[in-house]
Image: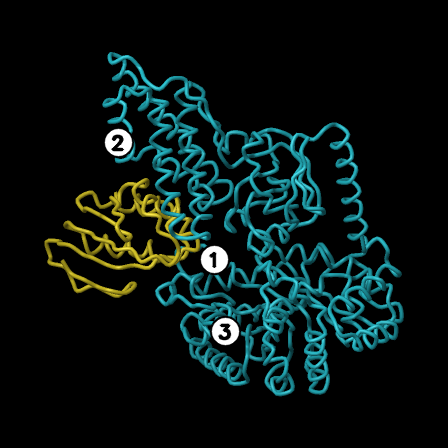
Amino acid sequence: MEKRRGIPVSPGVAIGPALVLDTEGVVIPQRTVPADQVEAEVGRLHVALEEAAAEARAARQRFTAQFGAAYGNIFGAQQSAFEDGAFWDRVTAAIRANSYSAEYAVSRGVREFVKKLEDAGRRLGAEAGAEVYRRAAELNDIARQVLHALHGHPAQPVGGVAGGGPFVVLANDLMPSDTADFSPRTVRAFATESGGPTSHTAILANALEIPAVVGVGRFLTDVSGGDVVIVDGERGLLILDPDEATVAEYEGRRVALLNRADRFHALRDKPAVTHDGTTVRLLGNIELAHEAAHCAEWGAEGVGLYRSEFLYLNKAADPTEEEHYEAYRSVVQTLGPDKPVVIRTLDLGADKVFSLSSLLTTEKNPFLGLRSVRLCLRKLDLFRTQLRAILRAAAHGDIRIMFPMISTADELRQCKTLLNEVKDDLDDAGLAFKRDIRVGTMIEVPSAALMADVLAREVDFFSVGTNDLVQYTLAADRNNENVANLYNPADPSVLRLIEGVVKAGRERGVEVNVCGEMSGEPVYTALLLGLGLRQLSATPRKIPEVKRVIRLLRVDEAERLAAQVRRMDTASQVTNYLRDHLRRILPEAVD
Amino acid sequence: MTQAGGNGRPDPPAPADGGAVRRAVRITNPYGLHHRVADRFARTAKTFPAVAVTVTNGDQRADGKSLWDLLGLVALPGAEVVLEVAGPDAPAAADALAAILAAPGGEDYTI
């Protein structure tokens, strides 16, 4: 048994057979063959390549049917690698020139190729090196499959075990489009060697409610497909070859967690009302339209943040107006026409949008660059398409529109002007839409927080995006380990900004919501209530625990807590105080 | 041979009997010219059997119809590669192939 530590990115535990998406070594029997066997070796190689290509072709079809083309094409690329005459002709020539065995020629040919890649990667720096390492792993996997075919037992491609799922998927790394196609029915959990806590893969794992651990470091060489493994998404552990006692322990924990989930489900239909009778509105954050069902399942009263970016990612073309419209409409259909659904307009950099890739300039500091609403205001056609779809979908329910990364009143006014133009266009076209759609802005740039009283004149609601607000206020990227200690939502500077936004909203009758990760963490619930917030939006599965805390609190208690916090100088003082408080009211929420 | 700098800028029309097109394209896929993108590119290139396709990245040169060759370019995000297409369908092939190189995604191809 071996425990490996990684970064927990999606809670829950899972035990199951491994589905390994990577490489393993194969023994090479002999380097050379007698001269009269050379043509036989060439023949063996070609038969093996055809077999491997046929396996990959079948896996491509199977995975495309099950998960979509982006997933199936991983095997499509493998198929092409087996069928690539230019490369294998060189390997064949090496067999003929040196009387190599087919196995040795394959192994040597791929190894030399990989070495060339790695040398080039090293010259290009650390980041390039990591990408090249990923590619090298895939090429080694190509070689491995050919060697297996040469040995007469074709390598089992990933799909080969698919009959026995669901699996624990193990990989070097997973791309967002891969994870987006996972479902709890096919994938129990996953663990990856690389990857970070804020990657889209991690975000999606959470949304899909699949336990996941990333950044474990190299482990794929120590595990084979079908081995029983444990992923502990609570503690960030991957357990290889677990002993019986550990399996039993984890089976118990898995059931206990499910029971906890069941208990939370029991909270679903109870209102989010404080002990002294103040109602708090709890909404869900979603990435994909079908996650609207999770909101209903976990007791969210609607969608407080629909991140529309996933309509744009990994696409061969920009999403059409109809694609936007269908996605938004399906959310309304899932939740019902009277549930609020706040759609945030495109919040990406140009590099992620198909038609804008030509705009890409190498920005030294992309998070302070042309992205999000700044980009939309430069690419009005793209923006109009989304605004049209949102307005049209809003005819079917309580859809609201929200602009991200607003930093000045001018930007907000430009967005509203454009929205009015789009309404006129829809009028001219005779299309149904919601004229009096409610309009809001994210408050995630410190300038917007400081000017909230001015911005409040322009909108119906604010939503405080704490992830970016913390990053921009403290000028610290939480993914940068050298400065991540500065990134803290409990920093007094951030709390002052939030409090200012709440005050501006109250004076102007503008609703204020918090939709960053902070709102899903029970440790901050009392403080947010005490600062005056009455609406929070979080990942749906976080809602029951937040609701539970709300139901235990009194507003005057929360306000006293906020008053104490206001006197503190540092984030660590605040955090310690909040944890102590939570421990008193709900001990199991703090460990 | 026509020349066009920059990303996606249209080329002057090639002669009616085909000809050669040369374009510089910046790779924007967050993983660079990775396996699936290279596969999509090679598969698309092969749909133009009479056209010769080469891609160069710095001093590395690849046959655009060979997946391995394309991977050997080590074209990472932000790299500017040069696409050269010669033959009867050169302009159409160049348009299709340049779009694949310039796209930030496109792993969901069905070719």
10 Å crowding of disc 1: few (<14), some (14-19), many (20+): many
Q: Residue at x 32, y 47 (%)?
A: B73
Q: Which residue is drawn at 55% across and 55% down?
A: A200
User: What letter labels the chain drawn in cyan?
Assistant: A
Residue A409 sits in which quadrant? bottom right
Which of A139/A188 is in front? A139
**Tally of numbered tags:** 3
10 Å crowding of disc 3: few (<14), some (14-19), many (20+): many
Specify which label sits upstream in the sequence, 2 or 1.
Answer: 2
Secondary structure beneath disc 3?
Answer: helix
Same chain letter for marks 2 and 3: yes
Residue A56 locus on image (x, y percent): 41, 33
Residue on which disc 3 sits = A373
Residue on which disc 2 sits = A90
Q: Which amino acid does label 3 sit on?
A: Val
Q: Which residue is drawn at 28% across and 41% down?
A: B66
Query: Chain B drawn in what color?
Result: yellow
Same chain letter for marks 1 and 3: yes
Residue on which disc 1 sits = A313
Q: What residue type is labelled 1?
A: Leu
Give the alpha-carbon distance from disc 1 to disc 3, as whole Å: 17 Å
Specify which label sits upstream in the sequence, 2 or 3.
Answer: 2
Whether residues under marks 1 and 3 lie with C-beta atoms below 8 angstroms apart, the answer is no
Mark 1 chain: A
